[in-house]
Amino acid sequence: MSLEAKIDNLSAVIEKLISVLESNAVTPTVKETPAPAVKEEPKPAVVAAPAAPQVAPAPAPTQMPTPPVFEPVTPPEVAEVMAEQAKKAPFDTAKGLVDYVMGAYREMGPAKGQGIQKVLVLAGYQNINDVKPEHYYEVWTGIEKLRTA
């Protein structure tokens, strides 16, 4: 028997089965069973509970405290330097510096005036014309110390 013949036979058998199933189709019926009767148990008598102790109401929630603010602490030496640098020299230009130094030299004389060069060297300079504005106060205070010594 060829393969095509087998397929034809199987198709015919399947069609026959389908028709038999359709003709014998039975709708299932659901048999309902009555729910079991529930027996109610007698309710216990209500007995008054003893009086509850008086409890103070819970306190209202409080707000979180504000966090502390910490200010930076500077060592006394640094604070002194910062305070000195916050001050300003009585001049703010290179010409003002030169005029001040020349006036101080004339006032102190050559013997004491030689100390001005030491003040410049301590500030990091060899020549008065090289002094930067941020070091004017340092030079000024150094010269003032020479004047009062």
Image: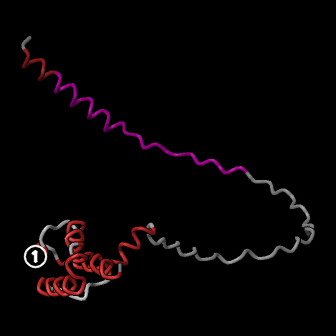
Choose between 47 and 52: the one closer to the eye.
52
Judged left or right of residue 36, residue 32 is left
Residue at 25% x, 88% y is 90
Quadrant assignment, res 100 = bottom left
Q: How many marks?
A: 1
| Disc 1 packing (10 Å; few <14; some 14–19; many ≥20) | few
Judged left or right of residue 75, residue 110 is left
Residue at 14% x, 67% y is 126
Element under label 1?
Answer: helix
User: Residue 142: within the magenta?
Assistant: no
**Residue 147 x, y percent position in the rendering:** 30, 82
User: Which amino acid type corresponds to the residue marked 1 in the rendered image?
Assistant: Asn
Quadrant holding the C terminus:
bottom left
User: Residue 23: within the magenta?
Assistant: yes
The part of the chain drawn in magenta is 10-36
Q: Is residue 86 above or below residue 46?
A: below
Q: Is residue 39 above or below residue 116?
A: above
Choose between 28 and 47: the one closer to the eye.
47
**Residue 40 x, y percent position in the rendering:** 81, 57
Q: Which residue in the structure is indicated by mark 1?
A: 129
**Residue 99 x, y percent position in the rendering:** 15, 87
**Residue 39 x, y percent position in the rendering:** 80, 54
